Image (cartoon, grey):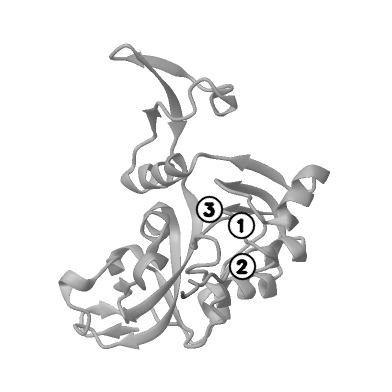
Amino acid sequence: MIVGRHANKVRDSVGAALEGVRDGSTIAVGGFGLCGNPEALIKGVVETGAANLHVVSNNAGNLGKGLALWLKAGIVGRVTCSYIGNNEDLQRMMKSGEVEVTLVPQGTLVERLRAAGAGIAGFYTPTGVGTVVAEGKDTRIFGGKEFLLEEALPVDLALLRAKRADSFGNLRFWRTAQNYMPVMASAAETAIAEVEELVALGDIGPDDVHLQGIFVHRLAVVAEHEDPFEYKTSRKRG
C-alpha cells in the first residue's frame, strides 16, 4: 500500500509482520537486559513454529523473561551474545550442549553488526588480544600493537521496539531502550519493529528520528507491554 509517495509498512498483526520467519534464521533482537525488548515479536516468533534459530543479542533473556521464552520453547540452536549473567536457562543449555554459545565482547558485537550494515567485511580490533577470544583468528601488528580480525555479522532479521513510528518506518526510541537497535536494523535483510504509537508522516521531526525508515521494512503496533526490570533498588532516607 502506498501513502502519498511513501510505502506504508504497517501490518495488521504481529503474525503478519513476522511472515517469512523460517527454520535456521539468524535473528538479531534488540534489548539490553530486559530494557527495550520487543515483547510481542518475541512471543510471535514462537507462534510461527520456526526452530533451530541463531539468536544475536546482548544477553538472550534474563531471569526467565525476554528471549528466555525462545530457550524454554526449544527453538534456539545457537546464540551469539556478549553477556550471560543471570540467564539460568542459557547457562544450563550451554553446559548441556543443547545450545551453541559464542561470547563476543560487547563493543565488538556492536561493531560487527555495524560493519555488516556498512558493507565492511571485517575489521581489526585490540579487544580480546591474548585471550580465548583471539583463538583461531588472524592477527596483525599496527603501530607496534597487536590487533585481531573480527568479521562482520549480517543477520536475516532484526526485531526492534520503538516508542513512536510513522507509516514509513521512521522510528523514535525511548531513551536508553534504543541500545543495539539501529545497528541491528542496518545489518538485517529485513528489520521488523513493534511500536507503541503510530503517528502521521511528518509528525516526527527530522531531528527527532533515531532510525530512518529506509532501514525498517515492517511495523506492528503494540500499545501494551509488560516492561519488566531485573532489580528494584531504592534510596533510604535519613
Q: Earlier in the sequence, mark 3 or mark 2?
A: 3
Residue for badge 3: 58
Is 207 situated above or below 97?
below
Residue occupying image coordinates x 34% and y 38%: 120
Asked which secondary structure carries label 3, the reply is loop
Q: Quadrant of residue 102?
A: top right
Report which quarter residue 188 is drawn in.
bottom left
Tell me if 97 is positioned left or right of 12 in this view: right
- In the image, taking residue 155 as reference, residue 202 lies left or right, namely left
Q: Verify CB contact (< 8 Å) between mark 1 and mark 2.
A: yes
At label 3, which amino acid type do we have? Answer: Asn
Query: Which of disc 2 and disc 1 is earlier in sequence?
Result: 1
- The kind of residue tagged 1 is Ala
Rendering coords of residue 164 (x, y %):
34, 80
Q: Locate residue 127, reporting x and y percent.
A: 44, 30
> Gap between marks 1 and 2, in whole Å?
7 Å
Residue at left offset 47%, top offset 69%? 36
Q: Which residue corresponds to mark 1? A: 60
Q: Secondary structure at mark 1?
A: loop
Please, is residue 46 above or below residue 121 in the view? below
Can residue 92 be seen here? The reply is yes
Q: Is residue 84 left or right of residue 2?
A: right
The answer to which image quadrant residue 71 occupies is bottom right
Label 2: which residue? 66
Mark 2 Cα-neighbour bin, 10 Å: few <14, some 14–19, many ≥20: many
Query: Is residue 25 found left or right of 177 in the rendered image?
Result: right
Q: Secondary structure at mark 2?
A: loop
Inter-mark Cα distance, 3 to 1: 6 Å
**CB within 8 Å, label 3 to label 1:** yes
